[in-house]
Image (cartoon, grey):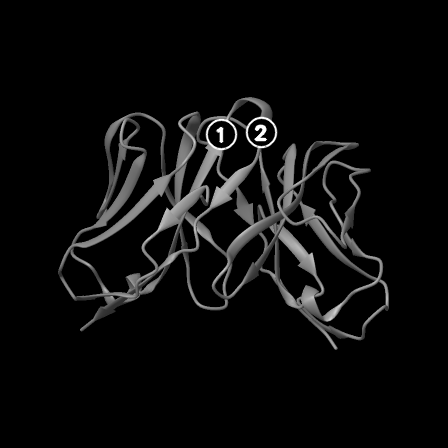
């Protein structure tokens, strides 16, 4: 089983809609969870991180974490065409693999006007 | 400006010709890492370094070498490149490890091995 799984998409939503991106992880010891955005041909850039159960909001973005279900999601409200990109979920485990970041394969999001 | 730099940005080479991709960060970060990104496979970690002279293998270390002699630099060495190492490579760094430590990525190096 892959460490981090994401819906491969592509996900297509109209401008102004809510985009929902999902990620599951296999290791219950995972501690920190990150969402990166990657535009085509560019490097990943961090949108949000979360490490406590519940919701974390930052502007139009909300990260949700449920450790019991091993599930983390990213909601993008009022989606804009500029949000069109690939979104990468990443998980960091503490302990013996301290420092390693495991990435999902990414979900491609298209926001159409 | 705080950044991670990589050189070269683009490289076309031939099988067996040794090459080095440099990575440098100016943020005094302890942790540095190399990833490769391939279509359908996502980002996979090659090697990482927790600090000077401390390196460890990631998921796909075969065919690669690294060194960390200085805190700011973390070069990736391909002793004998092969076509299956054609990929997009990213270097990343973070202040340390632990909860919430963001990894900053370099601009990427697109490598083609003929």
Can you say whether B22 is above or below B81 in the image?
A: above
Q: Is residue B17 visible?
A: yes
Which quadrant does the C terminus of chain B fall into?
A: bottom right
* Dot 2: chain letter: A
Work out whether B32 lies above or below A95: below
- A105 left or right, relative to B106: left
Give the residue drawn at x 50%, y 68%: A41
Q: Secondary structure at mark 2?
A: helix
Q: Quadrant of residue B15?
A: bottom right
Residue B28 is at least partly visible in this image: no
Residue sticking out furthest to the bottom: B114
Looking at the rendered structure, whether the residues under marks 2 and 1 are on a common chain is answered as: yes
Q: Which residue is identified by label 1?
A: A93
Instruction: State if disc 1 and disc 2 touch (CB < 8 Å).
Output: yes
Residue furthest out toward the front: A1
Distance, label 2 to label 1, CA atoms, is: 6 Å
Q: Which mark is residue B56?
A: none
């Amino acid at each position: 089983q892959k460490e981090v799984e994401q819906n491969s998409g592509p996900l297509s939503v109209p401008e102004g809609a809510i985009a929902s991106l999902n990620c599951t992880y296999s290791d219950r010891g995972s501690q920190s969870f990150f969402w990166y955005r990657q535009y085509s041909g560019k490097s990943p850039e961090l949108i949000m991180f979360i490490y406590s159960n519940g919701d974390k909001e930052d502007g139009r973005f909300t990260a949700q974490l449920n450790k019991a279900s091993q599930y983390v999601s990213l909601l993008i409200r009022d989606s804009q065409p500029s949000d069109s990109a690939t979104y990468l979920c990443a998980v960091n485990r503490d302990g013996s693999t301290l420092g390693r970041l495991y990435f999902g394969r990414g979900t491609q999001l298209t926001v159409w006007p | 400006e705080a950044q991670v730099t990589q050189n070269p940005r683009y490289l076309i080479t031939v099988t067996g010709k040794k090459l080095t991709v440099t990575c440098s960060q100016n943020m005094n970060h302890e942790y540095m890492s190399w990833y490769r990104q391939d279509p359908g496979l996502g980002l996979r970690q090659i090697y990482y370094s927790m600090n000077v002279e401390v390196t460890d293998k990631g998921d796909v270390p075969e065919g690669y070498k690294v060194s960390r002699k200085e805190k700011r630099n973390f070069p990736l060495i391909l002793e004998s490149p092969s076509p299956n190492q054609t990929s997009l490579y990213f270097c990343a760094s973070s202040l340390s490890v632990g909860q919430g430590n963001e990894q900053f990525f370099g601009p990427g190096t697109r490598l083609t091995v003929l």
